[in-house]
Structure formats: C-alpha cells, structure tokens
Image (cartoon, rainbow, N blue to C red):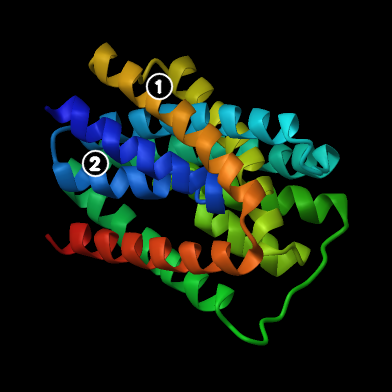
Amino acid sequence: MFNFIYGIIILFATFAGAFVGLGGGVIIKPLLDLVGHDTVDVVNFLSSCAVFSMSISATARHIQAKTKINFKFIFTLSAGAVAGGICGSFLFDYLLTITDNTALKRIQGIILGILLVLSVIYINLKKRKSFTVKNPAGIIFSGFALGLTASFLGVGGGPINVAFLVLFFSMTMKEAAVYSVGIIFFSQLSKLITIAAAGSIPEFSFITLAVAVICAVCGGIIGAAANKKCNEKTIKIIFTILVAAVAAVNFCNAIL
C-alpha cells in the first residue's frame, strides 16, 4: 500500500519537477514526511534517488528534442553545486547526530517553507529586478550556495534554483526550468556519492526504491515534453500554485 502511495507521489512530483524546474524533491520530501512511514534519513535517500533519476531522463528528453542548452554554463554552476552538495550532506549528517528525527524534520520544514514563499513572491513581482552574472567565480559561488541548500534540505533545490536563475542570470521561467534540472543532476549525484562513501546509506526496501526510480524516470520524460510545448505564462502559473501548496505542507509538517 505504501509503495503505491509513494509511486503516485513520486510520479506527480517528478513530472512537475521536470515541467517547471522544481526537481521533484521539494514535493516528494514533505509529502513522504506527511505520510510518516519512514524516518527522515530514508525519506532523504529515496527523494535523492528519485530526483537524480528524473534529472537524467528529463535532460535526455531535452537533448533528444534539441532544446538549446548552454552546457558550459551548467558545468560551471554545477562545479560549485557539487561542492555545496557535499557540504550540505555532511551538515545534515552532523545535525542528525546532535538532534532527534522530529526536530530535524521541523528545522528543514521551516527553512524550506520560508525559501519557497520568498521564491513565489519574487517570481510574481511585476517589475522584478534581475542581474546577469558572467564572472566564472561568481557562477561557481552561486552553484555552491544552491548545492548546499538543496542537499541539506534533501529536496533537489528546484524552486530555489528557478528563482535564483531568474534573479542572477536573467533567464525566463522556461529557460530556468531546463537549467534547474541540469544543476539538480550534479547536486544529487554528489550527494549520493557522499552518502555511499560515508557508509551512511539507510536501511530501505529495494521494492520501494525500484518503484521510486521507475516512477521518477517516467515523470521526468513526460514533464520535459510538457515544458517544451508550454509557454512562459503557463509555466509561471503552475510554478506558483505548486510551490505555494508545498510551502503550506512544509509549514504544516513543522507545526504538527
């Protein structure tokens, strides 16, 4: 029963993740926390595996569809994201040793909820200000900040990535969605490698993992195809609705 529920959540989340750049983890983690079947470390691990699988299938779909992608920019930003992802994973593991599971869930929920609300507000400003960072050091530092945040919160960083890319690199929502998924690939890869190297992979059901990966791959392919077909306005509306809803779930988790 729980595998079915997990599968539905992950399929929807990764579809939305690839469609508007949310990544999927920002939806998967709070909803699995709400289900309450697994501990925070298991939920983080499953979420990372699902988001990583989605990023591969979605990026492959964009390449197949000949979407214009600046891979040099992705690699530069992701270099910082990888380092940030490793630091975020260590930070999460450290906090898990000095606090209990419930307290850490609450901390993550509050921080993520605040960041999501700020992302929604910024994206919907009629005259929002944006910059165009071109310095490689600045791009790498930006990636580090994104990777650290995403890894610690265990969400892939999607909506934060999108708002960040629009703010500092003057991208459209549609462009930011594509690049967000590319960044998520590297940040989640670094996190999974770090978890494996540290020997901190939690005990989990292999059937549940298989369901998560299969649903994530399907969600990534369908979501990337939808992104290619939809316009900027549609992506902005769906982004706003989903992120606002997830922010509410995070605050609910933190309170309850």
Q: x, y (%) of residue 200?
A: 36, 20
Query: Along the polypeptide, which appears first: circle 2 or circle 1?
Result: 2
- The residue that mark 2 highlights is 32
Q: Nearer the viewer, residue 14 or 99?
A: 14
Q: Which residue is mark 1?
A: 214
Q: Is residue 108 visible?
A: yes
In the picture, measured across the screen, residue 232 lies left or right of residue 234, that is right
The type of residue carrying mark 2 is Leu
Q: Is residue 110 left or right of residue 224?
A: left
Q: Which quadrant of the structure image shows residue 234?
A: bottom right
Q: Secondary structure at mark 1?
A: helix
* Quarter occupied by the N terminus: top left
The residue positioned farthest toward the bottom in the image shown = 127
Q: Quadrant of residue 176?
A: bottom right
Residue at image point 40% right, 49% down: 26
Residue 101, quarter of the rendered image: top left
Counting from the top left corner in percent of width and height, residue 221 is at 54, 33
Q: CA distance from mark 2 to mark 1?
A: 17 Å
